[in-house]
Each structure stands twice: as structure tokens, then as C-alpha cells.
Image (cartoon, coloured by chain):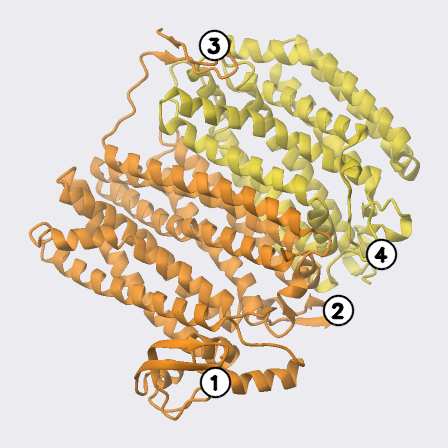
Amino acid sequence: MNRPIRSAWMEVIPLSLSELWFLLIAVLFVGFFFLEGFDFGVGMSTGIIAKTDRERRTLINSIGPFWDGNEVWLITAGGAMFAAFPHWYATLFSGFYLPLVVVLLALIGRGVAFEFRSKMKQQRWRKTWDIIIVVSSALLPFLFGVVFATLMKGLPIDGEMQLRAGFFDIVNPYTVIGGLSVTLLCLVHGLLFASLRTVGELRERALNTAQKLMLPLAALLAVYALMTYFMTDVFTVRGWALWIMVVLGAVSLALAAYFVRQKREGWAFGMTGAVIAIAFASVFIGLFPRVMVSSFGAAYDLTVYNAASGAYSLKVMTIVACTLLPFVLGYQIWSYYIFRKRLNEQHHLEY
Amino acid sequence: MDPIMLSRIQYALTTIFHFFFVPLSIGLVLLVAIMETLYVVKGKEIYKTMAKFWGKLFLINFAVGVVTGILQEFQFGMNWSEYSRFVGDVFGAPLAIEALLAFFMESTFIGLWIFGWDRLSKKVHLACIWLVFVGTFLSALWILAANSFMQHPVGFEINNGRAEMNDFFALITNGQLLVEFPHTIFGALMTGAFVVTGISAYKLMKKQDVEIFRKSFNIAIIIALVSSIGVAFSGHFQAQYLVETQPMKMAASEGTWTTTEDPAPWTVVAFIDPDKQENTGEIKIPGLLSYLSYSKFSGSVKGMKELQAEYEQTYGPGDYIPPVRTTFWSFRIMIAAGGLMIALALYGTFLAMRKKLEVAGKWFMRLMVFAISLPFIANTSGWIMTEVGRQPWTVFGYMTTEAGVSPNVSAGMILFSTIAFTAAYTVLGIVMVYLFVREIKAGPFAVEKPEDHDESADPFGVDGGYSVVTK
């Protein structure tokens, strides 16, 4: 059993290394959903707001330079879990075997579809890959939403840290609402990103659709928050902290709706991004110090302490991460800066 | 079926498939980077055309490499959760660093490269492709650091039944890594080089875009020569390291049941009978195995029977002999393919330097087209030898492959996922080859014409997207 290791610098930042890594993984997931959230949304929107092949291509080009990098946030989160919390990684990934198979198939299909779709002009070819883009872009946030919802609700984890989940442990009203919430949230977020990167009719359509979806989204999120209050223990465990998050989330969503109405998509996009960040931050706040809640009782919970790697490994990883992260963030921001201009009719589109 | 066997089959299938694309990506991106460098330095458009043409093939290949790589990472947790619990502390670190250091770099700069031709200055654009190369290189380094730990575990101690890292420096200066990394990287560069020379030879035979493909051939054949010789030398060092650290794998790959005489002969071919633990009929070259093992023509090499007895003493009762036939033959196939590539690279370089490439006749060109398959055969059989030869261990001396499997995942689930992944991979493989052939046939001057009519392929439209709207 690993107990929290403290050293001198931690007097300043009162976190043990395993707590710090929990925070880092939370940040990676929040970053992943903020970033890939909009490219999932843009992926879905190619089946909703694009009328012609050129419009569809414009939408894909709007995320073209970014989506691959966004996905690496997930891969890094997975790698960090493996290294910092091997038990969390092992229990989660083996326990969610079948949903993850579907996640992987969707990631595979989506990843190659962006590259393959433009290689041929045949209708059937394009149509096939376009459907794969839309379906996988919707399926992935849904499945992630389901999985995160189950994490809060709790799962049958035994004394050997093995998760033996039945179908209804994973698929139930609470988790399905969670999945739908994430999917719709990503769709609106993506529509706003699309409106931010395009001009003319396409931008109008993106904004209008986002506006129409605001109310259903608010309703869905409210239902989900309510269910979370009754069906999980996170509000009792974290109390006021989660209430603050709920209020912040609601305010951000209201502001997003306001800015969409004003056709100020930049601010609106920022606000839906904030909703995503707040939602997923709440999951991690609600869980802490647990990483997985066992429905067999607190004794079986996986926590940041009993699931973590040794102190040495965590220290090495911390040094590596602190050295590399500034560069990673630096060039990622730079790439967004390079492609900051809107894509218009005159633009040469990369196929 | 047995979940352990199924997990093994799945791991083998997905890993072998993934490793068709990884070396080609590393090799191709280097060639593309060299071509674009020539464009920036010499300012000739032809090099830009070359970089773009080979770049297209690289991107198709890269896409498949990336998506199959994600599965590789997830698989450890999904199918091999006990393995992940046991070694996550040590093994997870290089994986996390790979993502942080290499994947972010590759994916960000590849995006900038594809979409940045008009938006970045020539030099910055060139820097992007080189950074992609550095990314793939670093990715290989860290994944091999992780693999080297499985072959030769260092830098850790066992605490509470888990491996815990206690020396990161030992992990990244692992002797196994120092021999495995150069061998794998040279193999990757060789793969890219033989694919480019092969395709170029095909186009030269057809007398299409001769200037471009002659230049491509000339650049690639030099890389082919350097890397194929590099592969041989680094392979030699790796074999010597193997004798010291994994003698059982060495003995199995040589089909050596009993300890050899001194000096040890090298078995060219043999009929191996694993049940009787002997070979019937062998062709041997005297002294060569001693040379391969110790760089001198003396010294005997231990046989599997003696090693089995030794291992039983150290690790307790059990069968420590890996599948001998597979190890033996994959080793020989690798060496044969490698030797053939050295010969072809030598002769090709000779022709290119004498500017006799097209005069030399079609037989050589045909051979080079056929040789596209060689690096893939060598890469695959090399890994089969490395991984199968390590069995029954997953972490040599510490954890058997059987012990690493997920206890909560049923055989049915693994069977389902294996079928699903195999189906998806088959489709991917077919599509990729088809697209490759298409791009090659179209050639470097197949400019995308600006679409004068807009195909309304709206799959969710009323007509299912079959109407064509003219603007």
C-alpha cells in the first residue's frame, strides 16, 4: 500500500505526488473533452449543417490541423493513468472491455475516415466515410459520457480490485442521460467552433442550429445534475464545492445561450468550453480521493493512494511532465494561432 | 476457447498489423524530409513535387499507423490487466512519456505540414516535417525502452508483489535498448527506402515521370544501402547481447538442444522435432555460431536442455522452452530477407552511381518491385523471433505471459473483440493498399482539379446523396 509521500516543496503546494497526478490526469481529461469535444461536434455537424461536399470539406478542414493533436490528450491521459495509477488503469480498462472495443473501433474508423474520404470522388466512397465520421463522432462522446457517469455512480469492484460489471451496471437511465448530455454538449460546442472558423451561410447555419439546441441542452444537463444529486454520493462527499460548480456551470450555459443569440460565437464557444471543463472537473472533484467507487462499499474503493505507483516513479514522471508540458502547450497554441483565419469560399481547401 | 490463447492471438495479430505501418512511417517521413530539404536548399520545384507525392503515401500510411497504435495502448489494460498491475509502475512511464514527448509532436506538426503549405514560410514548413521525423524517432525510442524492459528487466525492485521503478536512468540505458533501438530504427529506414526504390523502379520501367522517379530512386537507394548494412551490424550486436541475457531465446533461434562443441557451428536449416527435443537432418557451417555469439571463432553456446535444467533450479518447475520451430524459422527468414536486401542495395547503388539504372535491364527493376515485400517480411519475422522467443515469459524471469491476462474478461469477449478488430484491420489493409496503388498509378502530377461541379453527396439528404448539383 502506498501512503502519500510528502517532501519539502509540498509544504508550499499541499499535495502528495499521487494527488498531484490525479490532478494532472483530471486536467488531461478536461483538456481532451474541451478540445476533442469540439472536433467531435464538428464531426457530427458535417451530417447536420453541411449541404454540399464542399461545405462538408470546409467543416473538416476547420478541424483538419487539430483533431489528431486533440486525440493525443486522450492517449496521454491513458498513458499517465497506466504509469501513475496502474490499478486504476487495469481495473477500468479490463472492466469496461466491451464498451472500449466499441470506442476503439470508432476511433479507428474516425481517424482513417478523415484521411481516406477525399482520396476518391465516387459517391459511394465519400458517403461511406462521411457516415463513419458522423456516427463515430457521436458515438465516442456518448460512450465516454456513459463511462464517466458509471464512475460516479459506482461499480461492482471486488477485493481483488477486479471490476465485474454486468450490462445494467454500465447501461442504465443515469448513464444514458450522462452519455446524451456529453454528446449534445459536444455537438453545440462543435457547432460554435464551426461558426467561428467559417463565413457566410455555413456560419449562419451553425449558429442557428446551436441556438436551437441550447434549450434541450440546458434541460438535459439539469436532469443529469438532478439525477447525480439523488443517485450518487458526490454531493454529500464534496458538498459546497460541487454546488459552486453547478452554479458556475449554469451561469456559463446561460451566458453561452446569450452570446449565441447575440451572434458572438467566440464568446459563446468559450462559454460552452467552460461548461465542458466545469462538468468534467466536477466528476473528478466528486470522485476525489477515490478514482473508482465500488458499489460493494468504501473499503473496496480504488483511491489515489491504493491505486498509485511508487514514490520514485511518480517523482520521475513529475519531473518529465513539468519539463515537457510547457513545450507541448506552446506549440499546440501556436498551431491554433497559425490556423486562426476563417475558411472562406476562396480558400484552397486541403483534401 | 482458452482466454489466454485468445489474448495471445489478438495481441499477435494487432501488433504485427500495427508494425506494418510504423517502420514505413518512420522511413518515409525521413525521405520526405530529405526531399523537402533539397527543395528548400536548391529551390527546384521538382523536389517539392517529389516531397508532396511521397508525402501523400506517407499520410495514408501514417493514418493507419496512428489508429492501430491507440489500440496497442488500450490493450494492455483491457486484455492484460494483471500484467499492467504488476509492471505499470515501470512500464507505464515510457508509454506516458512517449505520448507526451512524441505523439503530441508528431500529430501537431503533421497537421501544420499538411495544412500549412500556404501559411508557413518555406523554412518553417520544412522544420515541421523534420519535427514529425524526430517525433516518430522518439516514439520508437520510448516504446522500445518499454519493450526492452520486458526482454531484460532493469531499474526496479519488487515491492508488495509489484515491480516498482527505482532507477529511471537504468531503464533508459538498458543494454537491451541500446542494441534493440538501432536495429529497429535501421530496419524502419530500410523499409521506407525499399518501398520508395521499389515504386520508383516500377515507374521507371513504365517510363513515367522518369526524372522524378530516378531522383527518388537515387536518394532512397543510398538510405537503403546505409540502413541495410546498419541493420546487419546492429543485429549482430543484438545477438551477442542475447547470448548473455536471454540464452534460451538464442538457443531456440538456433535450434540448439544440447550445448554445442567449441567452436560452435551455425545451423543453416534443420528439421526440428520439439517433442523428441532433437533435430533430424541439419546443414551446418562450422564456427559461425561462435563468431555470431562472441565475435571470435571459439566458444560454445548453451543448449536448451541445459538451460531448461538451470531455469528450473532458478524459477521452479515449468516449461521454459519457447516454441522452437517458430523462433528458429523466423530468425532465418529475417536473416535471408536482410541478406537479400543488402545485395540489392549494393547493386542498386552501383547502378545508380554509374548512371546505368535504366540501361541495366528490366530484371533488376522487377526484382526491386518484388523487394518491396522484403523489409515487411524481415520486420515481422524479427519481432516474432523476439517476442515468441521470450515465452513463457512476458517480463523475463519475473512474470509469465499466462499470469498477465485479465481475470475478469471472458473468452467470449476476447473472441468477439478479436473478430471485430481483425475485420476492421482487414478492411483497413485492403483500403490502404488500394489507395496506395491508386496514388502510385496517378503519379506525382495528378493535380486535384478545382471541382467545377459540386457533388452533393449528402448522406442524410432526401435522396441519400446521389444527386449531382452543378454550380
> Eyeballing the image, is B221 above or below B170?
above
Q: Contact, CB < 8 Å: mark 1 with mark 3?
A: no
Badge 4 amino acid: Gly
Left or right placement of residue B59 versus residue A68 in this view: left
- Pointer 3 chain: B
- How many angstroms separate mark 2 from mark 1 (CA)? 32 Å
Nearer to me, B461 or B102: B461
- Pointer 4 chain: A
- How many angstroms separate mark 4 from mark 2 (CA)? 16 Å
Residue that badge 3 annotates: B463
Nearer to me, B435 or A72: B435
Residue B414 in the image: state x and y as whole percent: 62, 49
- Pointer 1 chain: B
- Element at badge 1? loop
**Same chain for marks 2 and 3?**
yes
- Element at badge 2? loop
Residue that badge 2 annotates: B161
Shown in yellow, the chain is A
Visible residue check, residue B59: no
Q: How many other residues sit within 10 Å of disc 4, few (<14), some (14-19) or many (≥20)?
A: few
Badge 3 amino acid: Asp
Residue that badge 4 annotates: A159
Left or right placement of residue A273 versus residue B137 in this view: right
Nearer to me, A232 or B46: A232
Q: Viewer-nearest of labels 4 and 1?
A: 1
**Same chain for marks 1 and 3?**
yes
Q: Colour of chain B?
A: orange
Badge 2 amino acid: Gly
Residue B443 in the image: state x and y as whole percent: 23, 35
Residue A130 in the image: state x and y as whole percent: 48, 24
Q: Contact, CB < 8 Å: mark 4 with mark 2?
A: no
